[in-house]
Amino acid sequence: MITITPSATQVLNKVMAEKGLTGHSLRVFVSGGGCSGLSYGMTFAEGPELGDQVLESNGVSVVVDPGSFQYLDGAEIDYVDSLMGGGFRIENPNAVRTCACGSSFQTSAGEQGTPCGH
């Protein structure tokens, strides 16, 4: 399961409305890269692709490819606003180490991820 917080839901819905993407899904993925070995990515998708996990959290449809889901199961996506600006933050119980920027992580097995075609 992936959880989208109310604050992240509000921002996602606003962005989708502004870009004319109402009805699209949020695609969340993991790819190799970043200073900790694995990097998070998010984009909007018209719908799931073959083999995708399809989830819903706070009214947001979330699609995740099977390779990424193993790293993201149990994660929470939040939107945090601070003096330095706002941004999405992923709290991931599968991460044993994250970089300071919060966009990359490492698991206990030290996986390096797989290239993502999204």
Image (cartoon, grey):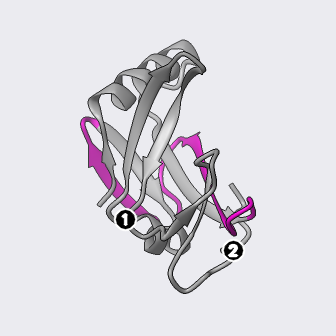
Which range is magenta?
33-59
Residue 113 in the image: above or below residue 36: below
In the picture, the disc for residue 14 is none
* Three-letter amino acid code at the position of disc 2: Thr
The spot of residue 15 in percent (x, y) is 51, 20
Q: Quadrant of the C terminus?
A: bottom right
Q: Which residue shows up at 45% across the image and 41% down it?
A: 25
Left or right for 107, reference 104: left
Residue 114's disc number:
2
Residue 38 in the magenta stretch? The answer is yes
Q: How many marks?
A: 2
x 48%, y 41%: residue: 89
Q: Of 71 and 37, which appears nearest the observer?
A: 37
Name the residue beneath numbered marker 1.
Answer: 93
Q: Position of residue 104 (x, y in %)?
A: 63, 57
117 relative position to 49: left or right? right
Lower position in the chain sequence, tag 1 or tag 2:
1
Q: Quadrant of the N terminus?
A: bottom left
- On screen, residue 83 above or below 1: above
